[in-house]
Image (cartoon, rainbow, N blue to C red):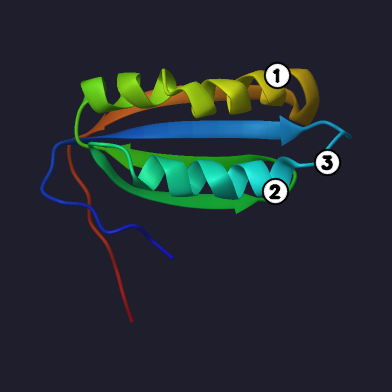
Amino acid sequence: MIASNPDIPYYAVIFTSVKSSHSEGYSEMAEAMHKLAAQQSGFLGVESAREEVGITVSYWKDLESIKQWKLNSQHLLAQKKGREQWYSQYKTRICRVEREYSFEQ
């Protein structure tokens, strides 16, 4: 499902990753992080897809909300496990969304 966002501007955190061969507990943690993020102040929505490269885009009201999410203790634990177990590489990009348009049939 495509996230519905409020008036622009807002921010997008784009997390791209390649998983390692160790995936035990990954799906459960990913689901828990989506649920936890949705409870955070300033959270607007999320979109995610995974094939060879996983892409998760979360949307936020402002940079302070993103900073607080990055520092969330449960999220910090997930980040640590990601580096140690689940990912062979990842990259995070933070962008300000200035314009958007869509199509729906």
Q: Using a 10 Å C-alpha cutoff, classify the residue at mark 2 as few (fewer than 14 neighbours), some (14 to 19) or many (20 or more).
A: few
Distance (Cα) linking label 1 and label 3: 14 Å
User: In the rendered image of this protein, does residue 81 appear above or below residue 100?
Assistant: above
| Quarter residue 90 falls in | top right
User: In the rendered image of this protein, does residue 20 appear above or below residue 84?
Assistant: below
To which residue does mark 1 refer? 83
- Residue at image location 22% in from the left, 52% down from the top: 5
Mark 1 vs mark 3: in front: 3
In the picture, the quarter occupied by the N terminus is bottom left
Q: Secondary structure at mark 1?
A: helix
- Residue at image location 22% in from the left, 49% down from the top: 100
Q: Using a 10 Å C-alpha cutoff, classify the residue at mark 3 as few (fewer than 14 neighbours), some (14 to 19) or many (20 or more).
A: few
To which residue does mark 2 refer? 27
Q: Amino acid at mark 3?
A: Glu
| CB-based contact (under 8 Å), mark 1 and mark 3 | no
Q: Using a 10 Å C-alpha cutoff, classify the residue at mark 1 as few (fewer than 14 neighbours), some (14 to 19) or many (20 or more).
A: few
Which of the labelled discs sits on residue 24, or is there none?
Answer: 3
Task: Answer left or right for 2 relative to 27.
Answer: left
Task: Answer left or right for 26 relative to 55.
Answer: right
